[in-house]
Image (cartoon, rainbow, N blue to C red):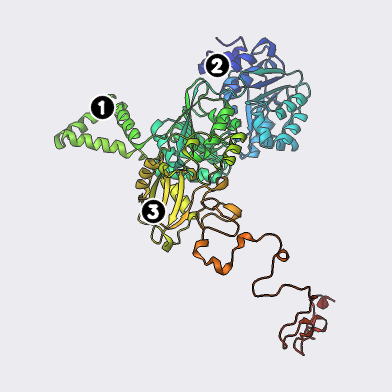
């Protein structure tokens, strides 16, 4: 469908840029119901919102004219949350309104304030800026809003999340009441609707997406990986896809710095983008991505908001987002303006439940899989090498002369080997990564009646449970391994357990009993995970700690698996005592009162038979060889003649109590000096 009829100057600009068919949001704002009205628009990221509100405000700014008059007071104000997005909007409006003779000025933080002041004094038609810098210009009287006809809030939800509500209200209150207000947002939470209700008049609602709908041009993938191999999986993903533009999202600035340094060290052309960079550094980083000098951008969520990079075909979630809205915003950096893209979520097996919750809330279809292996990447490298344009490009005379010289001095095999080595030397080496495999799924919890039946039948178990309910309980479900660390090395399950998980890429759920001996320790691994565990420890074994299969141990100090309440090593056992001191085998059977299972080891005749004792002491006869109690008065008993009670006790003669205590005579308090 071609663009609806609009201003002739804008039609020429769209034709020069190759815009033939409008996106859904662009067609909606040009509908007859939306002309010259306030708009409340929700559209997915990358759907062409900048061009959409540029077209929507043309009828108000130009009317029937094709060109603007001489620049004086600004007629339109566009507010964006970040510097990068504001500068991007500035560039878009320059080419869109260029044929109409518009003068567009940007006012963003980190730029020269005096240059912006001179530009505003010289006059302009459209101002694009960030909330903080625009408010500063308003308070200093540099920005005149008396002739303002249109105000646009781009990415309004992000501006409120960043705490710009007060600045936005200050700016909107300073503009004329008869203005048009266009509010564009990827989502419409309650605070956005409340803001629109306060500052818009009879707004026309445009919703071009279903709630939580994902991009149709984005392929979503979730990659399982070990928690300590997220960085290695990122390296293999970059090598596997070889996209011309990639965005990697991290939570913190520190994570951005670390990952960026690691990628650069491996040979990737990468740049970093975070809030700690100056405006000049950010501009150079984005320009390197646009020029093709860099192919990977490691960024935080806020720094990358609204950035539109050419040929950005891959988005990697190095850290999982905190909510599904952030997930959709991140993913919207690719698949823009009809282009295809891939979004990859790196999911450590310890965070799988969170990833599944985010996916369900976002309403996206995800393909699960393991990280690309080094062999897969090398196979792709060979295929790409054979399809390299270097073999099909036309040769020059200089190329032919160099080729003949090589053929005279080197054999064909030597030349081919040298070419292959040269091609491989330019590529970062792939990493050996581990695929944790499919998850066992959620544990099936018994209902209340089944648990009561188990307790009544004595079926309660203090181990890991039986294999029927999906846990690892019997010895047939476990495989023994040994570790070259024992009591002589101060072995303790509190630090052995993390080492086993890290080296073998397993979780606590797959680890059974741990037995510590003098020079070694033995532990159990679930049989279903034993092959992968053995393969992982073979790759990660070092000289200090060696792990290998072993036979079932005999003796040793036992630190059992999960006990009551699902506690593992380091948890609490019965009575609140810590697990690990002794293995817990459940309550021990007891015979009649006073007779334990060890009673045969002692002489019961010396202790007498306590099983027939019933009732209080005084109801039974006197002890053998001792007279019965005859009701003597308390205190009638006296010990030896030399013994004296507490009343006769006296301390040393020279001892004085606290009342007689006196401190040094010459000691003065600090307060006395001040007096």
Residue 537 percent across, percent down from the top left: 37, 47
What residue is shown at x 56% (from left), y 54% (from top)? 590
Q: Are marks 3 and 2 in contact (CB under 8 Å)?
A: no
Q: Is residue 471 left or right of residue 157?
A: left
Give 272 or 374, whichever is nearer the viewer: 374
Asked whether 260 or 319 is in front, the reply is 319
Which label number is shown at residue 396? 1
**Of tags 1 and 2, which is closer to the observer?**
2
603 above or below 442? below
Q: CA distance from mark 3 to mark 2?
A: 77 Å
Q: Secondary structure beneath disc 1?
A: loop
Relative vertical location of residue 75 with respect to residue 164 in this rendering, above or below = above
Where is residue 350? Give x, y as percent.
Answer: 51, 40
Quadrant containing the N terminus in the rendered view: top right
Tell me the crowding category of disc 1: few under 14, some 14 to 19, or many 20 or more residues within 10 angstroms, Cα based.
Answer: few
Estimate the spatial distance between the alpha carbons at disc 1 and disc 2, rounded to whole Å.
40 Å
Q: Mark 3 highlights which residue? A: 553
The reply to whether residue 407 is in sight is yes
Q: Residue furthest left?
A: 408
Nearest to the eye among marks 3 and 2: give it: 3
* Residue at the farthest bottom position: 653
Q: Crowding at label 3, few (<14), some or many (≥20) Cα neighbours within 10 Å?
A: some
Decide which of tag 3 and tag 2 comes sooner along the chain.
2
**Residue that numbered label 2 is attached to:** 14
Q: Indicate the position of residue 544 as horizontal and vertical percent values.
A: 37, 57
Residue 333 at x, y = what percent?
53, 29
Q: Name the one closer to the observer, 615 or 653.
A: 615
Kindly state the secondary structure of the residue where label 3 is placed: loop
Looking at marks 1 and 2 on the same chain, the residue that comes earlier in the sequence is marked by 2
- State the separation of the CA atoms marked 1 and 3: 73 Å
Residue drawn at x 63%, y 38% is: 109
């Amino acid at each position: 469908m071609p663009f609806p009829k609009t201003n002739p100057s804008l039609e020429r600009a769209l034709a020069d840029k190759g815009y033939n068919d409008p996106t859904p949001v662009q067609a909606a704002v040009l509908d007859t119901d939306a002309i010259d009205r306030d708009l409340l628009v929700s559209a997915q990221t990358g759907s062409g919102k900048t061009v959409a509100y540029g077209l929507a405000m043309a009828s108000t700014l130009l009317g029937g004219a094709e060109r603007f008059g001489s620049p004086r007071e600004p007629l339109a104000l566009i507010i964006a949350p970040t510097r990068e997005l504001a500068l991007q909007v500035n560039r878009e409006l320059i080419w869109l309104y260029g044929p109409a003779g518009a003068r567009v000025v940007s006012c963003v933080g980190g730029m020269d304030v005096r240059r912006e002041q001179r530009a505003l004094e010289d006059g302009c038609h459209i101002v694009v800026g960030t909330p903080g810098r625009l408010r500063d210009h308003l308070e200093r009287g540099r920005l005149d809003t008396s002739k303002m006809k249109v105000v646009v809030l781009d990415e309004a939800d992000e501006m409120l999340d960043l705490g710009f509500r007060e600045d936005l209200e200050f700016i909107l209150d300073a503009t004329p009441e008869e203005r048009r207000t266009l509010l564009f947002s990827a989502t419409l939470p309650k605070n956005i609707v409340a803001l629109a209700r306060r500052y818009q008049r009879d707004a026309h609602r445009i919703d071009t997406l279903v709630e939580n709908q994902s991009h149709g041009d984005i392929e979503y993938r979730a990659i399982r990986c070990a928690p300590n191999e997220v960085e290695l999986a990122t390296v293999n993903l970059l090598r596997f896809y070889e996209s011309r533009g990639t965005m990697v999202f991290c939570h913190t600035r520190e994570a951005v710095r670390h990952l960026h340094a690691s990628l650069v060290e491996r040979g990737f052309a990468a740049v970093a983008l975070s809030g700690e960079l100056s405006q000049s550094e950010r501009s150079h980083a984005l320009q390197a991505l646009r020029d093709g000098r860099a192919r990977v951008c490691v960024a935080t969520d806020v720094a990358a908001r609204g950035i539109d990079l050419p040929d950005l075909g891959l988005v990697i979630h190095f850290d999982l987002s905190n909510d599904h809205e952030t997930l959709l915003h991140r993913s919207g950096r690719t698949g823009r303006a009809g282009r295809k893209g891939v979004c990859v979520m790196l999911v450590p097996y310890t965070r799988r439940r969170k990833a599944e919750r985010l996916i369900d809330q976002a309403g996206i279809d995800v393909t699960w899989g393991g990280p690309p292996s080094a062999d897969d990447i090398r196979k792709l490298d060979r295929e790409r090498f054979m399809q390299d344009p270097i073999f099909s490009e036309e040769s020059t005379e200089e190329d032919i002369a160099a080729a003949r010289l090589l053929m005279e001095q080197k054999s064909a095999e030597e030349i081919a080997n040298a070419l292959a080595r040269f091609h491989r030397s330019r590529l970062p080496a792939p990493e050996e990564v581990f695929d944790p495999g499919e998850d066992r799924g959620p544990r099936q919890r018994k209902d209340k009646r089944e648990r009561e039946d188990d307790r009544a039948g004595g079926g309660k178990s203090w181990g890991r449970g039986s294999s029927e309910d999906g846990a690892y309980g019997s010895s047939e479900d476990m495989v023994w391994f040994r570790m070259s660390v024992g009591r002589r090395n101060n072995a303790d399950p509190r630090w052995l357990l993390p080492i086993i998980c890290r080296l073998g890429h397993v979780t606590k759920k797959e680890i059974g009993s741990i037995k510590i001996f003098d020079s070694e320790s033995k532990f159990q691994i679930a049989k279903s995970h034993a092959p992968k565990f053995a393969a992982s420890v073979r790759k990660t074994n070092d000289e200090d700690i060696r792990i290998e299969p072993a036979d079932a141990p005999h003796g040793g100090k036992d630190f059992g698996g999960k006990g009551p309440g699902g506690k593992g090593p380091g948890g609490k056992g019965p009575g609140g005592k810590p697990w690990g001191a002794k293995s817990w085998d459940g309550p021990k059977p007891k015979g009649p009162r006073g007779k334990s299972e060890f009673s045969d080891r002692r002489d019961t005749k010396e202790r007498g038979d306590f099983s027939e004792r019933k009732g209080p002491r005084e109801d039974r006869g006197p002890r053998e060889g001792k007279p019965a109690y005859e009701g003597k008065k308390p205190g009638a008993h006296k010990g030896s003649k030399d013994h004296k009670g507490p009343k006769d006790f006296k301390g040393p003669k020279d001892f004085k109590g606290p009342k007689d205590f006196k401190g040094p005579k010459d000691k003065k308090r600090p307060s006395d000096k001040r007096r």
